[in-house]
Every structure is written in C-alpha cells, then in structure tokens.
Image (spheres, grey):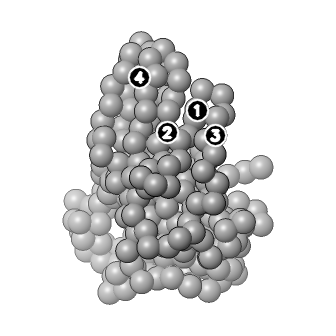
C-alpha cells in the first residue's frame, strides 16, 4: 500500500525565514511520481511540482526548492525567504508510474508566515 | 484558460436530504476526479473517470453516493440521503489523461458541505 507522511502538522515562521516541509513516502513500486500542492485559504489546491522517481536531481524554482532522496524515501520542500503569501496548507502526494492511479495525499502541513 | 469550475461553493442541508455537486473540468481534460477532504486531512479519492467511464470507484460509498459524467465533460456527484458525517469539502480535479506524461491534476475550489 502507498502512504505519505507529513510529520509536521503546523509550522510558524517569521517572514524572511527559510522553512523546510518534510515528506516521507512508502511504496512497493520501484517507479513512481511525487507531487507537492499548495492549498491557500481560498481552498483550491495549486500544483507546485511533479518529480519522477528516476530523477533525483534537486530542483529550484525561485524561492522554492525540492530535495528528493530515494535512499530515505523523502521529498522535502524548502521555501527560502518566506513571505506572508506563502501561508497555506502544503500537501505532498504520491502516484504510481504506469497509469497515475493510486494517487495518495499526505495529511498536509499548515504553514503560517508571520509578518 | 479557465480552470476547473465547481458549484455550489457552499451548501448547508439537513441530514437525510439529498445534495448534488457539479464540476466542469478544464477543456480538453479527459480524466476527472472527485475527492473528499475532511478537515485537517488530505484529499481522498472517491471516483475517477476516463471520459464518461468510471474506471476507479472503489472508494465511493455506493449505498448513498452516486456520480455521473454522461457526455464525458462535466460531472455531478450526488449524496442521498446525506448524513452528519458527510460534512466535508468535495473537490473536483481534472487531468489531460491517466498516463504519467499527462496525469498532473488541477483542482477546483471545492464545495464545502455542512450537514445539520
């Protein structure tokens, strides 16, 4: 069975601080996809990134970066120089490789960035 | 490009009443998903459509829940009768297709259901 764990339920930081959101996953598949989504107070989940299990290169997009480590089954997300607009619930998700089925979300981490 | 549209955004009903949610996916997206999101939790898949065919409805409580996507475009999710435990946010998402190259899901704003 596939499972995603986000151990941090809530995190609070002060604006401009860096923050890392942890994601640990379990799967029996050797190939799979990992995702991060952001859910702001408006409620709509916003796609941030998709990473396949073949590619362990870290990725950077502006203030966002992702660290994928297959050896530890982790796909952590770092926000550099956080801003108040980053306040949201962030979800990590896992899907199998062949047909994108078994799309499993973690419980989410609520990030509050204080001014 | 318009995103996934859902209506209504909010619904309050009394238990045992029926309720229906509507979703219009992104144009050209063949795969449509309905999710249930309880407070403080991640979304859980209820049903997945490929065009008009429900290809994964294993998590849909079929005694009271039903869904349809008659023309392979918009979809309706129905609960009859609603129970107190059905209070949650119902999310609709769509993707171009089911295969890994095109399975990134884009979500609508959700319908928040409150059952009294």
Seen at 58% across and 35% down, the residue is A65
According to the picture, the residue beneath numbered tag 4 turns out to be A113
C-alpha gap between disc 3 and disc 4 = 23 Å
According to the picture, the residue beneath numbered tag 1 turns out to be A64
- Residue B105, by quadrant, is bottom right
| Residues tagged 2 and 4 counted as in contact (Cβ below 8 A) | no
C-alpha gap between disc 2 and disc 4 = 15 Å
Q: Position of residue B54 (x, y in %)?
A: 56, 84
Residue A114 higher or lower than A27, as above or below: above
Q: Position of residue B48 (x, y in %)?
A: 54, 76
Q: Earlier in the sequence, mark 3 or mark 1?
A: 3
Seen at 46% across and 55% down, the residue is A71
Front label number (3 vs 1): 3
| Residues tagged 2 and 3 counted as in contact (Cβ below 8 A) | no
Direction front: furthest residue: A71
Front label number (2 vs 4): 2
Residue A59's label in the rendered image is: 3
Residue B111 is at least partly visible in this image: no
A95 or A28: nearer the viewer: A28
Residue B54 higher or lower than B29, as above or below: below
Residue A77's label in the rendered image is: 2
């Amino acid at each position: 069975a596939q499972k995603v764990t986000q151990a941090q339920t809530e995190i609070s930081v002060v604006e401009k601080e860096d923050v890392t959101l942890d994601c640990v996953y379990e799967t029996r598949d050797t190939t799979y996809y990992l995702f991060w989504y952001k859910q702001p107070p408006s409620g709509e989940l916003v796609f941030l990134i998709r990473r396949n299990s073949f590619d362990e290169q870290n990725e950077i997009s502006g203030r966002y970066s992702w660290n994928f480590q297959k050896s530890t089954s982790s796909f952590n997300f770092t926000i550099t120089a956080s801003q108040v607009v980053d306040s949201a619930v962030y979800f990590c998700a896992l899907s199998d490789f062949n047909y994108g089925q078994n799309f499993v979300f973690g419980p989410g981490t609520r990030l509050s960035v204080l001014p | 490009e318009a995103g996934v549209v859902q209506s209504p955004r909010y619904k309050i009903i009394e238990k045992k009443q029926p309720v229906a949610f509507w979703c219009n996916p992104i144009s050209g997206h063949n795969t449509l998903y309905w999710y249930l999101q309880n407070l403080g939790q991640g979304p859980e898949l209820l049903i997945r459509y490929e065009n008009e065919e429900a290809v994964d409805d294993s998590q849909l409580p079929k005694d009271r829940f039903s869904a349809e996507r008659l023309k392979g475009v918009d979809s309706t999710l129905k609960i009859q009768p609603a129970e107190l435990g059905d209070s949650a946010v119902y999310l609709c998402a769509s993707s171009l297709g089911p295969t890994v190259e095109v399975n990134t899901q884009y979500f609508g704003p959700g319908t928040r259901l409150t059952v009294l």
